Every structure is written in structure tokens, then in C-alpha cells.
Amino acid sequence: MKKFFFSYLALLLVTATLGAQNYVMKSMQMKAPVEVSSSLTWLHNYNADFEVTFGLGAGTDAVFGGWVGYKTDKLAEFDGKTITAVKIYVNEDMDDATVWVRKGNETVDKAASVAEVKVNLKGSTWSYIKFEEPITIDASTKYYIGYQGPVTATSGYPVAGDRTSLTVNDKGMSGAYYDDGRGAQYIDFADNSNHRAIGHLLVAALIDGNADECLPAINMQSVDFGEDLYLEIGTKITPVAKIDNAGYNDINSFEISYIHNGEEQTVTSEAVLERFGTVFVDLPEISVSGNESVSVKLSKVNDTAVENAKVFSIIYKGYNSADLVDRTALLLEKFTGQMCGACPSGENYVNKAVKGYESRAARINHHYGYMEDIFTLEESAYTGYLLQVAGAPSLAVNRTCYPSMAEQNGTPGIIPFHPYFLSGTFIKNELDKKSFTSISASDSYDQETREYSVSIKGTGAIDMKGMFVTAILTQSGYVAYQANGGANYSHDDFPILYLNDDFGGTEITTDGKDWSITLTKKIPETIGQNVKVDLDKLKLVAFVNGPLIATVPEQMVLNALTQTAATVTTSIENTEMENVNVYSEEGRIVVEGEYDSYEVYNAEGVRLSNEGLNAGLYIVKVIANGKAQTVKVMVR
């Protein structure tokens, strides 16, 4: 029996915020508050024009913390009112933290202390802090609210909202990402002691409210689906709700609304959950018989109904093992850069690992992770952001986290790893695994309009509705500078066109196991910084992936393919030599006439059997009268 963890988004007593909830740091978007009361007003710092907000890393002799500043013009309507409590969102538990309020029209390090409270802060949720005495607001001066706490040398405490951990060293503060409304920027604060106690983003002050009216904060830590989104029919699973209390009141009771395939049940707990306590609640068991839709939300806390509670829903996909199919190809996304001196060796590691499997390696070399260069596309940058790429060279296989690779790489739970750890054995083992869907593609190209079209289809072992299909054109053989590669380095497999309008792919919206998607776009003449597109050197990479999993940014690829694109202008349908005719028919190549022998190769030069050929370009070597001739033939 398998157990899966649901958790719950912070339920907050919030009604009013100043400005829109534009989170500056994108990873915080999943942590939006839920309005559950009309009697309380919280003054948030979501709007970027409040004050510059800092997030700092730390070393052995430093602290980690955060602060926000409320400008006087934002406080005008609250002049004379009181702050009775604050709430702060931190990413990890922090014991023995100090929450403070300061005021003054100079910088935060020179502002006067108004109040301080020692508290343990709960990670991944809002923590509520009451002050002994209300703080009266004087709108003629700025107010700063923040926290700080000790950090150990081994913590590697990351910047709040930023996925890249800062270097931990013995010199104290290692550096900072800050946001002034224009996007995250890096600053070295190693020698600036004035900033050692600042950082972070999400803070709110309760204005003229009774702090005791706040319901305890109950949060969602994560929803970890992993590969278990796809379950063999007959599997029994028991979802488990993980509930944390990060408020300053006890929880005496709560109710969970649990909906399975449209039938709602209520799960009730009357056990006392103390502040900073955690409880695990087993939800009703599910026996997988097909698609199993599950939705969970917190419906009551301390007998009070929760309004607008966040609902988390998943659909488990049931399958029969007999319906699984052979895997066509692996998606290999490498992150590289022209100025990256280690990247040529990273390419060599991948080349060595895929040797003998070239036609089954769907390769994309994203120019992201080191510095932007002439090949960098916006889509590649977003791919790197999604997959938590922290440097180059890095490699992601099937957009899936492989624990063994992550552990060798020293980054548990992270998808990308150094290409050094890739091996031919790993490639073989992954290719030997069965897939949840087949995939094939047929493409065409209009030379006059430069319009490229591809039809991608397959049959799944699962209901494919809700899965996504992505298609990308890549180019190879572009000669340009490369650090440790020289001025005449051949850059291969870099993307030149994403055929989908949405980065995450085109969703399959039809019910059932059979699926098809058609995508059409005009091929540009240049990409990046005036890189000329060579139609004779393009490949199609297409793949089918599952939905985005928020807790680990994983979009597990179910199957992939790679083939020469139909743009290759030297390819022909039928080729006639003297007394020999070569053409394609029903997935094979036909050679007719007077000849001794012939051989069929794919575009990578790998010799193939002349049966069941996928759509794409092939090279045929024909030997007649002791002489060899080669022709290109397109199989459609």
C-alpha cells in the first residue's frame, strides 16, 4: 500500500491588502493567503513600491533574516491606528528568531527599535506574532518590520524565493539577491555589516485588529506526485494529509473535505493541535480502477467555516502493464554557454554516453545557466528556471528527478546534474523501460512561406487527456566561438523554434488513449543574436509530458522522439540513378533496377534495418557495378 502526501495552503484571516498581489519572486506565487474573515485588515508588502526588499545568504558568523519597509505615503490612511500583530512567511523552520519593528526616515540600520519578540518561526507557512503592547502608527515616519535568526555553517540557507543557494563561507555574509521592482539582482555584502540582519519578502501587519481572532495558520508543505501519478490498476493508495499549526493559538478541531470521483466525504479531527504542532491524517483509501480524481481542502477550523479555501486536486492515471509500449527516445536537455569553459567537456560526456543510441537520444542544448550568448532563447531561459538550473554544464533527462544522479551530484531532490555522471549503462537502462504512450511524427515544410507543420500522435496505456505535447526544432553544425573550444567550434542541437504557443506544451483535450496534436509555425531566418537558421541542419524533437508538479518542478516525459526535419532542402521523395530508382513506401525504402546491394542509414550515420522506419530523412548507399552512390530519401 502506498501513501501520498497532501498538505494545506496557509489559511489566513486577511481582507485588505494595499496594492495588487504582484509577487516579485515567482516561486512565492503558490503561497497566496486565503481570505477567511471580513473583520481583519492586514497591511502587506506585496506591492513592489513599498520599499526595497532584501534576501541574504549567510556564513558561520552571520545571521539570516528579512525586513520590509512601509513608506510614509502608504501609511497615511493608517495614521493613529495600531499594529497589534504581524505575520511573516519563511521557507524553513527557524528556531530562536527575533521579530522586530523599527521606525525612522533613515535606513533600517539607523531606525529606532519599537518592539522585539523572541519566537520560533515555522517554515513554508505564515507565522503569527503578537506584541505585548499595540504599536501606534505615526504616518510621518517609515516603519520597518523584520526578523533575524542564527544560521549554521552547514545550512546553506537559500535566498527566500530564489532557487539558487548562496555560497556559505567562513567570512560571514556571502551575498544577496535584492529586488527594487525591476527584478532580482545580486550584490556582494561580505564587507557591509549594516546589512547582516536584513532580507526576505513576505511580511504583513495587523491593523487595529484583535489578534486573538486569528485562526491558527494551517499550511500546505507540498504535494509530491512523482511517478506515482501513474498507477497500475488494482493499486491501493491512502492519501495522507499533513497539517501544521504555525499560528499562536491551539487548534481544537478541524474538518477536511475529501472528494473522490465526485463523491464528497468529511474527515474530522478533534485532537488538539498545539502551536507549531504537526499532525498526519489518513484519508479514505482508493483502489485504482482507471482515472481517480481526488480533491482535498480544509473546510473548518475550530468549528469556523473556512471561506475561499485553496483546493488541491490530482488525477491518478490507472494502467494495465500489458498496454505499456517501448520507449522511442530519451529527452536530454543540456544547459551550456559559449563562455563556459567546462561545457565542451560536458558535451563530450553526453556524446560518450549516447554512443550507439544516437537515434534514440532527443537532444536539446539550451544556452542558459552560465551567461547569455548569441544562441540564447527566452524559452531556454524559462526552461532553466523551471528545472532549477544553477550552472553549466547541467543535464536534465526526461525532466525527471533521478535520486541516484541527484545524490552523486550533491543536489538531492533537484532534476539537473552534471553530465559527468551520465553513462551508457544509464541510457540503456532508461531506454529499456516501458513507456505510457507511443509517439510518432509526420512533418512538412513550405519553402515559399517558410511555414513548418508537424502532426504528432500516439496511443497511451493511460487516458491521455491532460497530458502535454511539446515540439522544438534544433540546429547543428553552427561554427562560432566557444570557451575551451576555439573560434571554429561546432555548436550542435541548439533550439531555434518552439512550435507550441505555451511553454508547458499543448494540452491533449480529448478523452481516451489515442491522441494527436498538429502544430504549425513560420521558421525564422535568424535567432538569438543574428544566428542564421540553416534549413539543411534542422531536427525535430518532440515529447509528451505530464502536468507540472509544483513541489518538485518535474514534468516527467512519457516518451520522446527525434528525427530530421522536413526542411532539409536536398532531400527528395524519389531519386533516380542510372538504371536504379530509389523511393519510400509504407515505412521502408524501395530500391529497384540494376544494383548489387544497398544499405540504409539515418541522418546520424547509423546503419538501420529497412523495416518500420519512422518519418524522416534517410541516406541510402547503393552499390552497382562496383561503384557506390549515396542518395537522400524522405520517409513520410
Image (cartoon, rainbow, N blue to C red):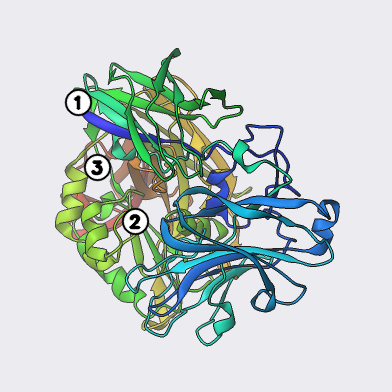
Residue marked by disc 3: 593
Q: Quadrant of residue 24?
A: bottom right
354 and 429: which is toward the camera? 429
Residue 438 on image: x %, y %: 31, 33
Residue 479 tag number: none
Vertical relation: 44 (above or below) 407: above
Residue 181 seen: no
Residue depicted at 53% across the width and 55% down the height: 379
Residue depicted at 81% across the width and 52% down the height: 78
- Packing grade of label 2 (10 A; few <14, some 14-19, many >=20) is many
The quadrant of the image that shows the C terminus is: top left
- Packing grade of label 3 (10 A; few <14, some 14-19, many >=20) is few
Residue depicted at 56% across the width and 85% down the height: 192
Along the polypeptide, which appears first: circle 1 or circle 2?
A: 1
Along the polypeptide, which appears first: circle 2 or circle 3?
A: 2
Residue 60 seen: yes
Residue marked by disc 2: 414
149 and 446: which is toward the camera? 149
Report helix, strand or loop for mark 3: strand
Residue 431 on image: x %, y %: 21, 46
Mark 2: which amino acid?
Ile
Mark 3: which amino acid?
Gly
Residue 321 tag number: 1
Mark 1: which amino acid?
Ser
